[in-house]
């Protein structure tokens, strides 16, 4: 979808099968960015604007139309991100987003506050890092301050997040409150048998193997191993591997690559 004329950077690292809409614009704050890295099989949609000097996003991500990413400091997004339309991500204070995160449409993620006139003694100006862990989900229309969102935390639709989010806790409201004692957390433990049963719904090629321990990895050059304990896989970029990852994502199952 892109002939790279809509990417302006001194260093461009593009993975395989990257799709960037022609109307998307990726550049630095004042001309060329210093470094842009986009992982394998990642999609960036129509009218997306990425305006920063250091930006990276992992494999199998989707950034939907009219989203805007900007800031002075690096923005790093992990693998398997799903970012809904018209989402704003600010990195003036620096923003880090882990693997397997969902950011629903029309959400705003902020790492700074700045407007009031200092000549009048405005008390509200500053920037702080925004740190989002793995498997975090902002359901949609969320507004997020520069907080730390621990792994597996979740904010319900329309939440205004002003405080840190604890691991596997669910928040909602404006300002958002911890609702975990009243509703289910985002994740509950499941058995290895249940994991195996979930994986059994997929067609698995001969060069794909489902494992539970790294000791089962014998031939990573010819076989892609998918570990259902920690949700990692040995990345080979084979046609069957990519097709299998597409199958998994169609059922919202997410794996991240590990080097071997």
Image (cartoon, rainbow, N blue to C red):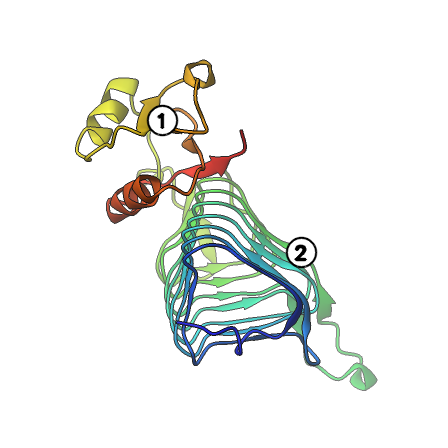
Q: Is residue 248 above or below residue 26?
A: above
The kind of secondary structure element at disc 1 is loop
Q: Quadrant of the N terminus?
A: bottom left
Q: How many marks?
A: 2
Give yes or no for contact between labels 2 and 1 (Cβ–Cβ under 8 Å): no
Which residue does the numbered mark 2 point to in the structure image? 129
Q: Is residue 57 left or right of residue 47?
A: right
Mark 1 lies on residue: 228
Asked where in the image residue 51 lies, by quadrant, the reply is: bottom right
* Front position in the image: 42 or 241: 241
Which residue is located at x 45 percent, y 43 percent?
153
Residue shown at the point (53%, 78%) measured from the top left: 5
- Would residue 12 be found to the left or right of residue 153 on screen? right
Neighbours of disc 1 within 10 Å: few (<14), some (14-19), many (20+): some
Q: Residue furthest top?
A: 215
Residue 241 point in image, percent of width and height: 34, 40
- x, y (%) of residue 47? 43, 79
Q: Looking at the picture, does residue 34 appear above or below residue 253?
A: below
**Residue 236 disc label:** none
Residue under the image location 40 percent in, 32 percent down: 231
Indicate the secondary structure of the residue bearing disc 2: loop
Q: Nearer the viewer, residue 159 or 245?
A: 245
Q: In which quadrant of the rendered view does residue 82 lie? A: bottom left
The mark lying in front, picked from 2 and 1, is 1
Task: State the image coordinates of residue 260 (x, y, percent, origin top left).
Answer: 53, 29
């Amino acid at each position: 979808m892109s002939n790279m004329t809509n990417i302006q950077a001194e260093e461009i690292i593009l993975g395989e099968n990257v799709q960037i809409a022609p109307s998307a614009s990726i550049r630095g704050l004042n001309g060329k960015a210093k470094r842009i890295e986009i992982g394998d099989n990642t999609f960036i949609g129509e009218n997306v604007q990425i305006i920063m000097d250091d930006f990276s996003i992992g494999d199998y991500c989707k950034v939907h139309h009219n989203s805007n990413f900007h800031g002075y400091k690096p923005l790093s997004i992990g693998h398997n991100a799903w970012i809904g339309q018209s989402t704003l991500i600010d990195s003036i204070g620096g923003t880090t987003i882990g693997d397997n995160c969902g950011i629903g449409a029309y959400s705003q993620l902020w790492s700074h506050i700045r407007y009031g006139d200092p000549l009048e003694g405005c008390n509200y100006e500053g920037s702080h890092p925004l740190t989002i862990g793995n498997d975090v989900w902002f359901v949609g229309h969320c507004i997020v301050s520069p907080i730390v969102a621990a792994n597996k935390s979740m904010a319900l639709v329309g939440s205004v997040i002003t405080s840190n989010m604890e691991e596997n806790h669910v928040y909602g409201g404006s300002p958002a409150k911890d609702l975990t004692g009243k509703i289910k957390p985002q994740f509950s433990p499941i058995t290895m048998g249940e994991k195996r049963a979930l994986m059994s719904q997929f067609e698995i090629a001969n060069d794909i193997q489902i494992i539970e321990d790294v000791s089962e990895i014998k031939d990573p050059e010819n076989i892609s191993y998918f570990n259902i304990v920690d949700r990692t896989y040995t990345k080979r970029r084979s046609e069957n591997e990519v097709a299998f990852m597409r199958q998994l994502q169609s059922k919202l199952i997410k794996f991240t690559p590990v080097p071997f």
